[in-house]
Amino acid sequence: MKIALVTMNVKAGQCEENVRFMKDKIMQAREDGADLIVFPQNAVSGYLLGDTWLDDDYCRYIDSFNDDIIKESNDIAIVWGNIRYRNHRRFNAAFFAYQGMTHMRVKKNHSSPYMNDFAYFENNNINSAIEYKDDMIFALNFGNEIQLTDMNINLDARPYDIDHNLDVAGNVIYVNACGMQNNDHSIMLMEGGSCVYRNGKCLYHAPYFVEDYAIVDLDCEQEDCDKERSLLNALTMGIREFDKQVLGGRLPWVVGMSGGLDSSVTSALFVHALGKERVHGYNLATRHNSETTKSNARKEAEQLGIECREGAIEDLVAQAQETLLKEYQYNIDECPVLVKENLQARARGYLLNSFAGILGGVVINNANKVEVSLGYCTLYGDSVGAISPIADLTKVQLFDLSKELNKVFEKEVIPMGLLPNVQKNRIDWEMPPSAELKENQFDPMKWFYHDYLVEHLGNDISISKFIQSYEDGSLDETIKPWITYYGLDNPKAFIEDLQWFLSTQQRNSFKCLQLPPALCVHHKTYANRNLTQMRKDDLYIEKFKKKYELQ
């Protein structure tokens, strides 16, 4: 039996475009002699539609396409995902159609960090075995479900998660969507990777993050190999899809090239994804910027083949200070130093948006996940942009991504001097990370350690569990050396740093709501901590301080 596998770039909400694509592939599969063609979950409408699912008229419209697809099944069996809408009831379903006859399986509702099925769909226990050609019994499933049958057909709309791969087992035809589907501030990257396993063999595995069509013979003896799930490929797909679906694929992209690691990575990512003609760099220096960072920006632009205009923001900042004093009687020199730092950051944001306006383009945001978590940015300054491509990646994760980008470009587009030299869990920086908004300024983060906290606290480790693990020595082995390196094996230093980390998160959590949408590489992205949780955390912290007499 020949199966046509379609790893489909499902455009959320674009039903007519999606169904037109499906019909083209059905025709191609028919010409290729396929007995069965399989599309992903929610192939008609997309999965992450939010409260659009509550629009009855729109759901009725989505459901109407099922009849169109059934009409195509006279000489080929078709499997696809879509909703069944009846009398204000919505069922997220998988359909099997052949010669006008259909079978349906309803997806079991569950909540994930990126979608709450219970808010939109109803459960139903419809589940019938499907006998089709060669007396083979099929079962319709979702995700990695498995039933006792000759062949499972599993539909999915699974986003990429850098830490977790989906394991499929048994005899299974697994088909996943690729592309981008937006969910509030989170841009989820559908990973694709459709595959066929039978009798313990991988008969076919599609590449990740790209559309794919393949004919697979279930009786084939030749084995295929698993494909690599590359972070760079995930981000590249996300940038291209956002650029095309949201902005039409034509606008210039403006990036502030400071000469630091974050802006170096985002610049290289966009050139890799969209080409050097679409990316425009600007170095916006103050007197605090070193010649090293300015040189880094200049050299990276040259290596990437893009223009990077250099200029200073001193006059703009001085004029802002003069206006505040002359018109509003505020003397910046008498204000806390942070006020002047923020003036500089907002001057840069103002200029970047001005450049984007002049070019008819948009700005790239350069924030990484640690900065986002701690609110280490200035609203309307370095927080501006249309998209945050690295906002779900810690600084440590950017180190490896930088090396991969250099490998892909086959030259040093990310200056190696920006990467730390780590030996025996000691960090040596040629150029430590800095916002360069005052003399001898260095970022306050404890790299590797705070990266770990951002990734795990409130996600898979609670505050109480973390403190308990610190006390009984059962902390993750990867983090222990960094606790020693930063002197946090002293209980007083440990708890003071933890309090600083948590209070900084809480104090700046409002900023996350105003940052650009982020390309997400985790199913569970950074979530703002609420006051109730913080008070609960305070209880454990106070208990710890009392135990070690740190009051």
Image (spheres, rainbow, N blue to C red):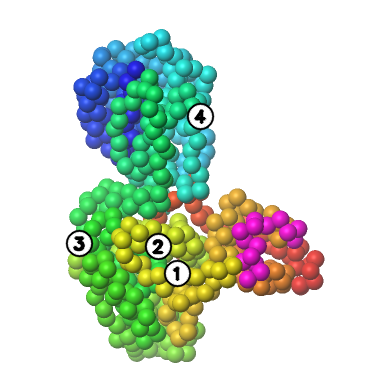
Circle 2 sits on which residue? 402
Q: What element does badge 2 sit on?
A: helix
> Callout 4: few (<14), some (14-19), or many (20+) C-alpha neighbours within 10 Å?
some
Magenta stretch, residue numbers: 471-485
The residue lying at 36 percent from left, 50 percent from top is 233
Q: What element does badge 3 sit on?
A: helix
Residue 206 in the image: state x and y as whole percent.
Answer: 36, 36
As rendered, which of 11 and 402 lies closer to the eye?
Answer: 402
Counting residues from the start of the chain, the first of labels 2 and 1 encountered is 2
Amino acid identity at mark 3: Glu
Circle 4 sits on which residue? 169
Quarter of the figure with the C terminus = bottom right
Give yes or no for residue 479 being in the magenta stretch.
yes
As rendered, which of 185 and 303 lies closer to the eye?
Answer: 303
Nearest-to-viewer mark from 3 and 4:
4
Image: 294 above or below 40: below
Amino acid identity at mark 1: Leu
Circle 3 sits on which residue? 277
Counting residues from the start of the chain, the first of labels 3 and 2 encountered is 3
